[in-house]
Amino acid sequence: MAEAPNIPDELEVRAKWGDFKFTPAIEKLAKWQIAKYPEGRQKSAVMALLDLAQRQVGADTETQGWLPVPVIEYVAAYLDMPYMRAYEVATFYTMYNLAPVGRFHVQVCGTTPCMLRGSDDVMAACKNKGMAKGKTTPDGLFTLTEVECMGNCSNAPMVQINDDNYEDLDYDIMTRILEDLADGKEISVGSQIGRKTSEPKGGPVVLKEMVKANHDYRKEW
């Protein structure tokens, strides 16, 4: 798994982020999230507000974003909850970054289904592009993290890069994705071999007659 996050010096962090507050646009979204919950239950919006805060930091730094301690403190105060409760959430879920990351946060699934389908080759493609687990490349472009299952086992191996999933990978496909990201090219998300959701590779392999009968029925109808 990835090394512990390399959290910057606290004095430097507070000097840069100590006066953090939501922008008007982000605050509008924050209030919309809070309004989903009954009066007195605004703390339930903590996950959404931490995500919004991380995205605002990302926009300010031109990266995928992270959560400096003063930013977590701000979110906790905004929701009138103890800082430690917000910090517990931020440290529990891998969707939150506790240290700076690059423009592209590459999260490689290394759990059993992906491992059996070739996640080691995906990781090798990342390493051969100069990436190391828990580190950001010197150009600030990529941060590599190995994570647990992200729920795309049927299309393994897969990675999540920022908000998007890329599935049905191998060494060459992963290499191309990284090169295209570095070059600023548009990349198709999801399955890289054209599968829709989790359909079988190559089409149906069982109950073909039933599939054909249903298709014929719909045509007649």
Image: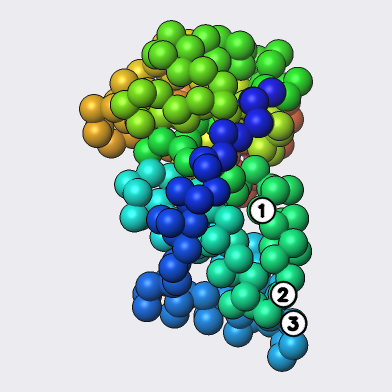
Q: Residue at x 68, y 38 (%)?
A: 151
Residue tagged by mark 2? Answer: 81
Q: Is residue 42 visible?
A: yes
Q: Residues within 10 Å of mark 1 (few under 14, many from 20)?
A: many
Q: Is residue 129 left or right of residue 37?
A: left
Residue tagged by mark 3? Answer: 41
Task: Pick whichever, 19 or 46, lies toward us.
Answer: 19
Residue 111: percent from left, percent from top = 73, 24
Which element is circle 2 on? loop
Q: In 3D space, how far apart are the residues under numbered discs 1 and 2 (Cα atoms)?
A: 14 Å
Q: Residue at x 45, y 27 (%)?
A: 136
**Marker disc for residue 187:** none
Q: Earlier in the sequence, mark 3 or mark 1?
A: 3
Q: Residue at x 40, y 24 (%)?
A: 137
In the rendered image, the quadrant that contains the C terminus is bottom right
Q: In 3D space, how far apart are the residues under numbered discs 3 and 1 (Cα atoms)?
A: 19 Å
Q: Earlier in the sequence, mark 3 or mark 2?
A: 3
Q: Quadrant of residue 205?
A: top right
Residue 61: percent from left, percent from top = 35, 49
Residue 201: percent from left, percent from top = 58, 23
